[in-house]
Amino acid sequence: MSAAQSTPDAPGIVRWDLAATAAARFTPAGPAISARAMRLAVASLRRHAESSVDHVHRISGLDAARDLRDSTVLVVDRAGWSKANAQSFEVLMEPAVEALRRRRPEQFGAAATALGGTAAAMEMAAVLGFLSAKVLGQYDPYAGLVSAVAAQRHPGGRLMLVAPNILTVERELNVEPEDFRLWVCLHEQTHRVQFAAAPWLREHMLAQITELADSLMGQPDTLRARLAEAVRSLPGRATEGPRPPLGVVGLLMGRREKEVLSHLTAVMSLLEGHANFVMDGVDASVVPSVKTIRRRFERRSELQGALDRFVRRLLGMDAKMRQYRDGQRFVEHVVGAVGLGRFNRVWDAPENLPTEAEIHDPAAWIARVLGGGAPPA
């Protein structure tokens, strides 16, 4: 049963349809801006999303950036972002849910009871509503899996730029709007190019997430506690009583679960670190006020990776994950040691992805994958 086929009456772990619609009620109001100004801003974002691809190609050296037809660029509002992510969460969780339903119906019933489809949906809606006011942009590689219609529109995925949030941040930072919009688009288009350069990556990550989620489904009480903790931990929300010690959850994982978690940690660090590497690869000839933007934006680190931080907390990954700067340091070290072309072999196959240990020891990745550290060409 696909996301498009699920119904409110179907038994399940989370009422995803309810989560999508309820998230809009939790979405804070956007900035006060006239309809005309918003139309101009949307056109500007579309223009920069298009022009940023050439810069990503030049900086990354990935030929996949030459002709991106695998996905769609959407400029959305906060409610649209929330709905899209509710759909993607269902896609990510569905394989594990269905596997549990088939193989272990008793545990599936226990999970459904423990989570409570409606209650869990409302908690998810609260999270999505909060994040909808924070996320500037996002590349969703799983959008084509939502339905047959979605697969036709964006078979590879969809890139979303959240217009109200971009306008809010550029005003708060008091930076040149056109420069800031291009700068944001560079980061998000890099993610799009990564998945185009490595067409196997979507299914690879989906398989890893499914395996980890399947394990979580077998621990319904723990999963509910994680979801509730993620909601209570949102800034501005009052908390009552002790919080579940999510850092201890790792002790409940078996060896294979820890291996999967470590692998996802490394891949996510690589993707974000590489996007930061490309974003920082522009100079004043491309983004005239780039130094000012970087300096002021660093003070707003809470805006970066908000969705990923929630997913980490939900999966117990927050104790394992390093900040994205570790991934950027990995990329910078490898490129500096062996050159951009040889670094790009990381996108050739799953076995070329760095391990979590190699993210912190780039020389080990060079030795394993490239067979040494020849100087850049």
Image (cartoon, rainbow, N blue to C red):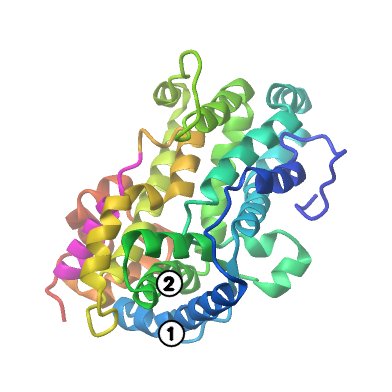
Give left or right: position of 113 versus 241: right
Nearer to us in this view, 304 or 224: 304
Nearer to us in this view, 286 or 260: 286
Q: Residues within 10 Å of mark 1 (few under 14, many from 20)?
A: some
Nearer to us in this view, 324 or 110: 324
Q: Amino acid at mark 1?
A: Ser
Q: Amino acid at mark 2?
A: Cys
Figure quadrant of residue 187: bottom left
Secondary structure at badge 2 equals: helix
Q: Which residues are magenta?
A: 321-337
Give left or right: position of 277 versus 352: left
Q: Position of residue 373 (x, y in %)?
A: 15, 66
Dot 2 or dot 1: first in sequence order is: 1
Residue under label 1: 51
Q: Quadrant of the C terminus?
A: bottom left
Q: Residue at x 46, y 27 (%)?
A: 254
Q: Position of residue 115 (x, y in %)?
A: 68, 26
Residue under label 2: 185
Give the vertical position of 39 relative to 367 (above or below). below
Give the vertical position of 292 relative to 288 (above or below). above
